[in-house]
Amino acid sequence: MNGQSVVIIGAGQGGLQAAVSLRQNGYQGAVTLVGGEPGLPYQRPPLSKAYLLDGRAEALVLRPESFFASKQVTYLPGTWADRIDRAARRVRVRGPEGEQDLPYDDLILATGTRNLRPPIDGLERAHDLRTLADAAALSAALARPRQIAVIGGGFIGLEFAAVARKLGHAVSVIEAAPRLMSRAVSAAMSRHFEEYHRALGVALHLGVPAVHVGAQAVGLADGREVAAEFVLLAAGVRPNVELAEAAGLATGNGVIVDAALRCSDPAISALGDCASFPDPRSGRLLRLESVQAATDHARLIAARIALGAGADYAALPWFWSDQGDQKLQIAGYAGPEAEEETVAEGIVARFDSHGLAAVETVNNARIHMKARRLLASGAPVDLADLGEVIAA
């Protein structure tokens, strides 16, 4: 229960939350947090929005340096793990202090994701938006008017597009799927945001992939070219599972864990964007790219390690995306087979074989919170039930 040491690989919000929650739960052993980037752990969601407008990196910091000393958490920034020795329970890391082996009784993998790099000729000319360093480079590039192309019509690409338009840039979004945010939202919500971005002046190229990035244009599969002095790649992500795979842990679309978020080696847990866990509603493996899921995962793992708590993960997923003055909020999670019903303007319900799976809203925090409470109750919900809750 309260072993000798915990090592956490990954210092994003989930990894940091694991360290915080261990101490909050009274864990007395050594805690080591290994972060691949220099500097203090920071928030990532504002990188595609507020940071590009105000450039205030200090506002992103999650905990001051004093936190680590006061809570006796050893923080190793700019350090990468490259080998797990499961038999000896040691992790080899490399960083500013050179190579070292960190012993653990419990190991937590919070390795996150990296940008998917589609087979596009000339993609090395495109810019990423994954880290604070990436965002700083983008902020500098936005200092003068440009023709900008965004490859990818998901949350990050559209958030960036709205900011770039606000700053006066000409923006085109290229999306291989026939609609925006197709993996995440209903067709009705895709249409809403398509109309919104077109009204902002964003040129949308849907249903056609990019095949070439040149010095002044992006070539499309249908032969057209989109003028672009600057290209942002936002075509999705892939979980970082190489460390786990090399250690012989079970992986698929992420590091596979059980309902308690344990890997195939019970001394190792995984959380956040890199973890593939059983969906409490359907039982199928699910991987969520969500700060909320990462922090909820971290709290459950920390309670299990510190207190021996035996609860399975059952938190309700929720998501958000700020695109200009449109705040998209999603309560619950709907798979690709879910059917949709437009309940009212800016409110879409999605249903699967278990009943109500998710509720999507735009600029309606009140209904979003009602939907979260309704879905979190665990009771089957139909359209009439949802209508009563919305009307109340």
Image (cartoon, rainbow, N blue to C red):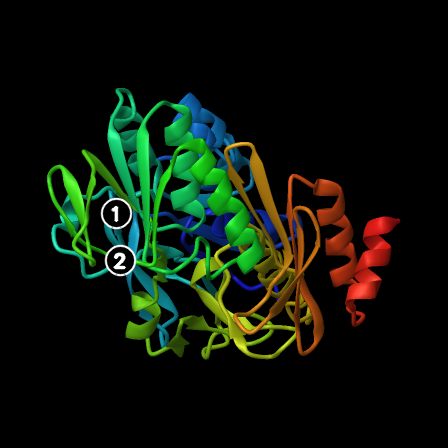
- Residue at image position (55%, 47%) is 192
> Which disc number belongs to residue 95?
1
Circle 2 — which element? loop
Quarter the N terminus occupies:
bottom right
Q: In this view, does 325 lie above or below 223?
A: above
> Residue 318, percent across and down?
62, 54
Q: What residue type is labelled 1?
A: Gly
Badge 1 element = strand
Q: Are marks 1 and 2 in contact (CB under 8 Å)?
A: no
Which quadrant holds residue 116? Answer: bottom left
Q: Where does residue 350 sit, x and y in percent of width and height?
A: 65, 64
Q: Can residue 42 be seen in this view?
A: no
Identity of the residue drawn at 34% across and 41% down? 131
Rendered residue at 33%/34% (across/down):
135
> Which one is nearer the viewer's eye here, 389 or 294?
389
Residue at the spot of label 2: 209
In the foreground, 47 or 22: 47
Give the distance between the C-alpha atoms of the residues marked 1 and 2, in whole angstroms. Answer: 39 Å
Q: Where is residue 325 in the image (x, y as percent from the top left)?
A: 55, 32
Classify 33 as above or below 276: above
Mark 1 surroundings: few (<14), some (14-19) or many (≥20) residues within 10 A: some
The structure residue drawn at horizontal position 11% and vertical position 39%, both measured from the top left corner, is 215
Amino acid, disc 2? Pro
